Image (cartoon, rainbow, N blue to C red):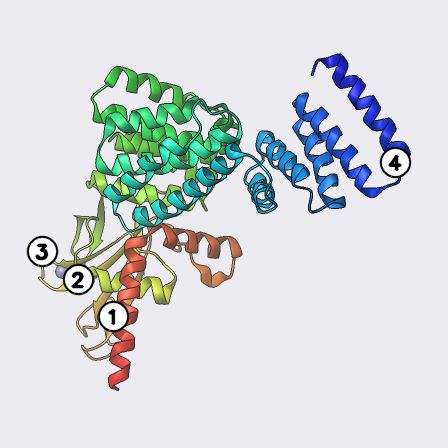
Amino acid sequence: MSQGKLDDAHDYAKHALSIATDMLQIAEIQMLLGDVFRSKEEWNTAVAHFKKATEIDSENKEAWFGLAKSLESSGKGDDWKTAAEKTLQLGGGDSGLRSKLADYIAVDEGTDRAKIQIALNQNEEAEKTLEGLIPLLPTDPKGNDELRWTTVLLQLGQVKRRLGRYEELEACSKKLLSFKKVHDVLLLRGIMNIKVDLAVALKGQNKMEELDTLVEEVLAVTPDDSETLFQKGLLLGSIERQYEAVKYLRQSLKLDRFHARAMTRLKFELETIGDARTQFWCPHCQEKYTIPVYPTDPAGIPTMVFYVKTEDVIPDSVRHVSCRSCGRMTTLILWVCRNCLEGYAGALQVRIDPASPVVRGQGDETYYHRVNWACNSCQETEPRVHIRNKDPREKRFFEAMLALRQDLVEQIRFFDQVESEMSQFE
Ligand SMILES: [Zn+2]
Ligand SMILES: [Zn+2]
């Protein structure tokens, strides 16, 4: 319809509406108005009119069809699906709508399946599932359709990255970044995550010049709030520029000390670099010397679990130190100091020894004694984040940190299981 005819139709319908008394007649007029606004690509107004029509005449398949198509064009998530299902139930719609709905459902089911496969680390299976969905997605996507693509491509990128298929990861990330709607919906955090993938892809293919340009572009993003700084650290760490990553992660945490992802990532990067050292003071012979912080020794895992479960502390490293001077054993529980983020704080766990100057006279040798240990850098004495003080932010922080440490969560589950099996024999 031309603009003039549309206006005529609009005026006519409005007039008809003002004099109509029969409900079914009103529904018809609402549909006519819906059609007018659909032609003008004013989707929200079209939706409102078709909705009124379905409310008056809930069995009107044409009204439902109009509503489905307008909702789909309006790009508002999954709402159109319900309307499309209703249309087809009533025997309405056309083959286009039917196949579109079938594709839509197939993509939904496929991404649900891929999500499970990714969680189970079945990457090749997930890759196959996701690649099978691509032909079901609309070519030349716009608006809402971009978001359908996005769901699939985000998962596919994750899988390609795990499988080290960098050329395909690059294609995935670039396609995602080309979507206009993605920038509106994913916001900075989501976009930065895609750029991290792209950086990994470029590094994997040794495309260093393009990588440098990308890094420069990301580092120039402002403002430097804790989230942006975290993302910068994340990107640098992903391309093995760990020392710079650590710098940005510390800055992020200085602005928000409850940024669980930054804290977890900082620990991860420090462990990857591997050269962190801390001062050790032997509680038996009082000899002082520096020792490495990482890695946690295998015997340290149960201690780590114990600390998480009973002390609400997530240690970053646990080491059994056999003193180089007196030969006696001390367990060292360490975490990055929450105050200065530079040094390590923690606890010493020693077997009570009547000769020890620290725990002298505390009991017999079968007992352990714990000594809290101040940060060796800033001397902060209570540097850990502790939920005992009932600060709800700290409680949330602890829980978020734990959720990011799936390795620890699995260990805890394992120990709980052993414990419950043991208790059955008692
Ligand atoms: Zn010693
Ligand atoms: Zn400190």
Q: CA distance from mark 3 to mark 2?
A: 19 Å
Residue at left 72%, top 24%? 36
Residue 154 seen:
yes
Q: Report which residue position mark 2 lands on.
A: 299
Q: Quadrant of the N terminus?
A: top right
Point out residue 50 in the picture as x, y percentages from the top left corner: 70, 36
Q: Secondary structure at mark 3?
A: loop
Residue lying at the far front in this picture: please name it.
Answer: 91
Ligand 1 lies under 8 Å from the Cβ of mark 3: yes
- Depicted 39 relative to depicted 21: above or below: above
- Seen from the viewer's position, the closer of residues 78 and 90 is 90
| Mark 2 Cα-neighbour bin, 10 Å: few <14, some 14–19, many ≥20 | few
Q: Quadrant of residue 200?
A: top left
Q: What amino acid type should be assigned to the residue bearing mark 3?
A: Arg
Which residue carries the number 3 mark?
Answer: 324
Q: In the image, what residue type sits under mark 2?
A: Ala
Q: CA distance from mark 1 to mark 3?
A: 20 Å
Q: Which residue is mark 4?
A: 20
